Image (cartoon, rainbow, N blue to C red):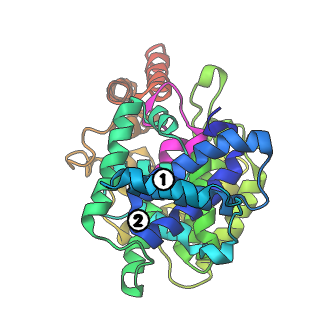
Amino acid sequence: MTEASLDRHLVREIAPQVLGVIARKYGDFAAAEDAVQEALIAASVQWPVAGVPANPKGWLYQVAIRKLADQARSESARRKREENVATELFRDEPFVPPRDSDIGIDEDDTLVLLFMCSHPALTPSSAIALTLRAVGGLTTAEIASAFLVPEATMAQRISRAKANIKSSGIPFSMPTDAERAERLGAVLHVLYLIFNEGYTSTSGAELNRPDLSNEAIRLTRVVRQLRPNDGEVTGLLALMLLTDARRSARTGEFGALIPLDEQNRDLWDRAFIDEGISLVSDALAKGAVGPYQIQAAIAAVHDEARDPADTDWRQILMLYGLLEKMSDNVMVALNKAVAVAMVSGPESGLRAVDVLKNDPRIRDHYRLDAVRGHLFERSGNVEKAIHHFRAAADKTQSTPERNYLLAKAAWLSQK
C-alpha cells in the first residue's frame, strides 16, 4: 500500500503544514521533507487498518519527529548506544499525538513553505517541481509523468532544489515586510506556470493535464485564504477559474483541439465563471491593479460573451494595452495583435505581428506562426496561411496542437 491509498485531500491539506512547522523549528528543509514523507508512508500502512486518527495532523507530526530523530541518530558515531536508550525510553510510552497548539502549527506555515519552494534562487522548473512535491503532495512519479521525464530525473531535480535552499542560507520563516511583495510575486508566478502547464501542456499527447491545473487552483485558494486582501492573489485565482471554466469545451473527439471561437459555450462551467467574475470585480475595486487582475478581466470579457460575435474586442484591446504597459511581455504583445486584428481587420493585426518577428524571445516560437496563419487566413491569403500553419506545426511539441494546425493547413489546401 502506498501514499496514494490515503485520502488525497486530507494529505494535501495537512502534510504541508506539518512539513512547514518541522522545517521552521529545525531549520533543515531536506531532512524535514524526508521525515514527513516517511510519516506519510507509515500512515498509508496504519490508517487503512486502524482508521484515521482523531488528530491526523498531530499523528503525522509525532511520527515525523521520531523519523527525524532516527535520521539524526543514524548519522552519529554513538548510533547504537543512542538507539538502545531510545528503545528504553519509548518501550512503554503510549502514542498520544500532540495537540496543534502544543506543536505550534500555524496556517502561515503553508505560505512560508510556498515562499521557500518559489524562491527566485531556484530555476522555474525546480520551483514548480518542489512546490508540487512539498506543498501539493504529488509524488515524484506523478510530477515526472506530468513533465514527461523519467522519475529518476525528476528526483534529481527535486534533490538539487532542496540542496540549493539549504546552501542559500535563507531562513525558514515568513519574509519581512520589505521582502514579502517580491517573494509573493515569485509564489504567484510559480502557481501561474503550474496552471498554464496543466491547462495547455507544452508537450505530449494530451492537450491538458487537469491534475496540474486543479492543483494550481487549490494552492492559489490556500494563498488567498492567508492573504484575502491582496488584489493580485485574488486576480490570479479569478484568472484560473475563468480560464479553466472552458476546459470541457476545448477538446472534441479523440482529444482534438477546439479553438475558442468554435467551442460549445453551453459546456462552459458557469459556476467557475460566476465565481471568477465576482473575484475579479472585487479585486479591481480595491485600487491598485496588477497584471493578473488585468488578465482575469480579459478572460471575463471572453466568458461573458454567449456567442463569439458578442465578444467586446475593443475592451479586450484596451485591457491588453494596459497590460503591455505593465510589463515587457512578448506574449502580451502577440495577443494584443490578435485583438487589433479583431477590431481593425487582419491587415492591421499582421502589421502588429510583423513588429515581433525579429524579437529573439518569440521569433522561433510556434505561436507566432500560428497567429500569422490565422491572420493570413482571415485576410484571404490562403497560400501564406498554409505556410505558417505548417511552420507552427513543425515547431510545437504538443500533439493536439500539431494535429489542429496540420488539419487547418490541409483544409485550406483543398479550397
Q: Which mark is residue 84?
A: 1
* Magenta stretch contains residue 196: yes
Q: Position of residue 104 (x, y in %)?
A: 59, 76
Q: Amino acid at mark 2?
A: Met
**Residue located farthest toward the top when viewing the structure as drawn:** 414
* Tally of marks: 2
Residue at image point 37% right, 75% down? 182
Q: Position of residue 92 (x, y in %)?
A: 68, 57
Indicate the quadrant containing the N terminus: top left, top right, bottom left or bottom right.
Answer: top right
Front of the two marks 1 and 2: 1
Q: Amino acid at mark 1?
A: Asn
Q: Secondary structure at mark 1?
A: helix
Question: Distance between the Cα atoms at labels 1 and 2?
Answer: 36 Å
Q: Position of residue 158 (x, y in %)?
A: 37, 46
Residue occupied by mark 2: 116
Residue at image point 43% right, 57% down? 82
Q: Earlier in the sequence, mark 1 or mark 2?
A: 1
Structural crowding at the residue carrying mark 1, measured as other residues with C-alpha within 10 Å and reported as few (<14), some (14–19) or many (≥20) = few
* Magenta stretch contains residue 184: no
Q: Image height check: is 208 above or below 307?
A: above
Residue at image point 36% right, 64% down? 119
Q: Image height check: is 221 above or below 252?
A: below
Which region shows up in magenta?
Answer: 193-212
The foreground one among 199 and 178 is 178
